[in-house]
Image (spheres, rainbow, N blue to C red):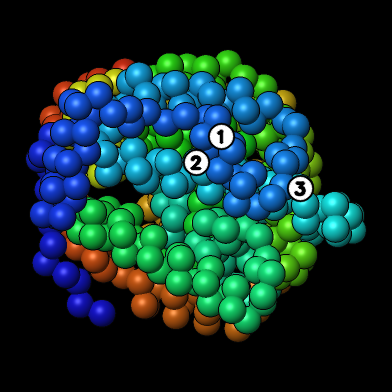
Amino acid sequence: MAEKNIVTSTDYENPHRPLPVRIFNSIGKLSENLGLSSSLNIETFTASAIRKTRLEDFGDDGHFEALEILINSINEEAELTPTGRLIQKIRLASALVHRLRIEELLKQHPEIHDINLGKIILITGLQRSGTTILHRLLNSHPNIRGVSGVEALNPLPPSNKAKGTITRNVHAVLAQRLISYLSPQFMAVHPIDHNEPEEDVMLLDLNFMSQAPEAIMHVPSYSRWLEEQDHTQTYEYFHKVLKILCWQRPSSNWVLKTPHHMEYLDVFLKVFPTATVVQTHRDPRKTMPSFCSMVAHNRGIFSDHVDPKEIARHWSRKARRMVELTIQSRAKADTDRFVDVSYYDLMKDPIAQLLRIYLKAGIDFDAEAVQKAKTFMKRNPQNRFGRHAYHLSDFGLSEKIIEDYFSFYREKYEIPFE
């Protein structure tokens, strides 16, 4: 497939706005100026979810405190456009509806609790270090499954199987098209396909305790609060939701992926004690500006106020914290559970890296699986949707600043300069 000639914009402070969106935002701002409140409200979300489902049990795992902290941070710090607020309202309200339906499903089918997920491969590594391509390569194996984009948006089975399956797929397609409409260049930054596996951080969002909000909005008080919390209940809930997915579409082998897990790897290993962990590595001088650019594009969807230098300050500190915590967690765990994959080795010979992972996880890599992986690579070349442009200077960064943050990481894992 020929590469598109799209090159992403680096004018992060002036995000793309389709005319209908500009009109909607203008009307929304006018309403605010007239004194009409547009703030997110937890009581409104809760009442709406109960009314919609006629259920009342949300589960009891601290999620309401997390949701309240997040809502306060959005209202006070995020500076969302009316479009941004509308999308967040829909997202948070949907999560509460899913929680109600999850508790009801588990009451009706308690056998779900007894499901054994089988072998789990977890991919984690700093953002933009090859985690997505590796995730999708592993998912191409006929006997391994990830969390699909459809499931990430709605992990629950439809009440009417035939009609409901179509509705879930349509919902996922519409969500993908909405992102492309609001940010036409985003697919060049991070390709989205509802048929491919998605980051399971979207399931952690059901507990309102994930890095996702700070990757799309300016929510510093929520981020600080999140780092101080015990995430055990969040990962136990995540485990429960994976069992619900396995009940619907069984599999004896799973591949999970999100950089978020680096920050709480100790908790993940406690909840998933037999998982094989794959950590990807790439030159931070490339990963940091690439991810900062991705965050800037994300924030531009929801807000007119995008500060590239603030994004760099926040995520440089956050990424260093993630690396440090992962090193600490690995030092306490069984070293035989980990596989380190160089981004450069992965790009040079993906089949060889897959073989290393499957040997460690105890999963067969037969001729069919090899062919599936080769077919995936052929159909998904780099820059398929355009070229993602980014520069250290766009974010007030330099090679020296990056090295000051990450030289210890480079030395530990012998990461080459790219």
For numbered disc 1, what is the local secondary structure?
Answer: loop
The x and y percentages for residue 404 are: 31, 18
The x and y percentages for residue 196 are: 48, 67
Residue 109 in the image: above or below residue 379: above
Q: Give the CA distance from mark 1 to mark 2.
A: 8 Å
CA neighbours of label 1 inside 10 A, class few (<14), some (14 to 19), many (20+): many
For numbered disc 3, what is the local secondary structure?
Answer: helix
For label 1, the residue is: 208
Numbered marks: total: 3
Label located before the other in sequence (2 or 3)? 2
Q: Give the CA distance from mark 1 to mark 3.
A: 16 Å
Q: Quadrant of the N terminus?
A: bottom left
Closer to the eye: label 1 or 3: 3
Amino acid on which disc 2 is placed: Leu
Left/right of residue 38 with respect to residue 172 in the rendered view: left
> Which label is found at residue 92?
2
Tell me if residue 335 can be seen: no
